[in-house]
Image (cartoon, rainbow, N blue to C red):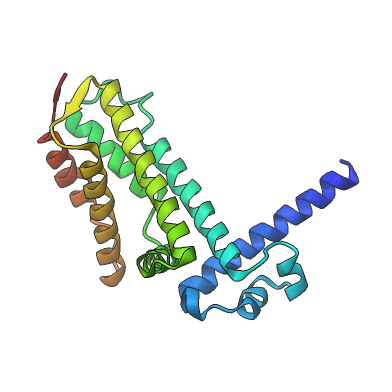
Amino acid sequence: MTTVQSAGRRREATRERMLDAAAVVLAREGIQGASVEHLCDQAGFTRGAFYSNFSSKDELVMAVFEREREQMLSRMREAADGTDLQDLDLTDLFATIMQRFVLLQPPDRDWYLVHAEFGLRGVRDDEVGRAFNAAWQQVKHQLETLISDVLDRLDLRLTVPVPHVATVLMGTYDNALREALIEHREIDTDLLGTTLPALLLAVVHPR
């Protein structure tokens, strides 16, 4: 390994530690309350190390969001992978996709709090909030594409707009996750694995 490669790996490791630390601090203190000092303390780095990787707290926060977004999209794609679902009927297929996603993205209090912080910043609609909103729209658009791809694979069509289905899926999961965290229990798999697939079946038909 060359010196340049070694330095690059160290820099990437430092960046990842800062992102991990930022997720913890943002969940605990919120975006407004989190300071660069607290972020550095959590990660075990100096301010100099921080500013050698990020120009501002907002840039770090956006980097946390981008990483979370990519991880979420990866889990959605993995859950919807149809290579071993060909022999299932539609009810079981939709239920399996939902259950896979829950297993890949189990209830996590810090994860939920960080995403709630992102949402609040987006509603405030300041400069960083608008960046959050644009990135979140990309998440929804990619979910819409994933839904369309799954339906095309099954030779099905929706009787309602794809964006509406994406909104229902995202909203249902978000509410199910919040209820699970508030009530200190597992996420409601009957809702996601039985009721939601039944609702989806009501709005799909063969082409």
Q: Is residue 128 left or right of residue 166?
A: right
Residue at position x 38%, y 23% from top?
83
Q: Please state the horizontal and vertical placement of residue 159, each as a whole percent of the image.
A: 13, 32
Q: Quadrant of the C terminus?
A: top left
Figure check: 43 above or below 13: below
User: Which of the 4 image quarters holds residue 99?
Assistant: top left
In front of the other: 170 or 52 = 52
Figure check: 143 above or below 57: above
Q: Please state the horizontal and vertical placement of residue 60, each as a whole percent of the image.
A: 59, 64
Query: In this view, which residue lies farthest toward the left?
Result: 202
Residue at position x 70%, y 73% from top?
44
Instruction: Tell me if I can see residue 126 in this picture.
Output: yes
User: Which of the 4 image quarters holds residue 166?
Assistant: top left
Q: Is residue 76 left or right of residue 62?
A: left
Instruction: Tell me if I can see residue 46 in this picture.
Output: no
In front of the other: 78 or 36 = 36
Q: Please state the horizontal and vertical placement of residue 39, each as a whole percent of the image.
A: 62, 74
Query: In this view, which residue lies farthest toward the right?
Result: 3
Q: Quadrant of the N terminus?
A: top right
Q: Is residue 28 left or right of residue 206?
A: right
Q: Is residue 85 left or right of residue 132?
A: left
How many badges with numbers are in the image?
0
Residue at position x 71%, y 53% from top?
12
Q: Please state the horizontal and vertical placement of residue 9, each as a whole percent of the image.
A: 76, 50
User: Which of the 4 image quarters holds residue 129?
Assistant: bottom left
Figure check: 57 above or below 140: below
Residue at position x 50%, y 81% from top?
33
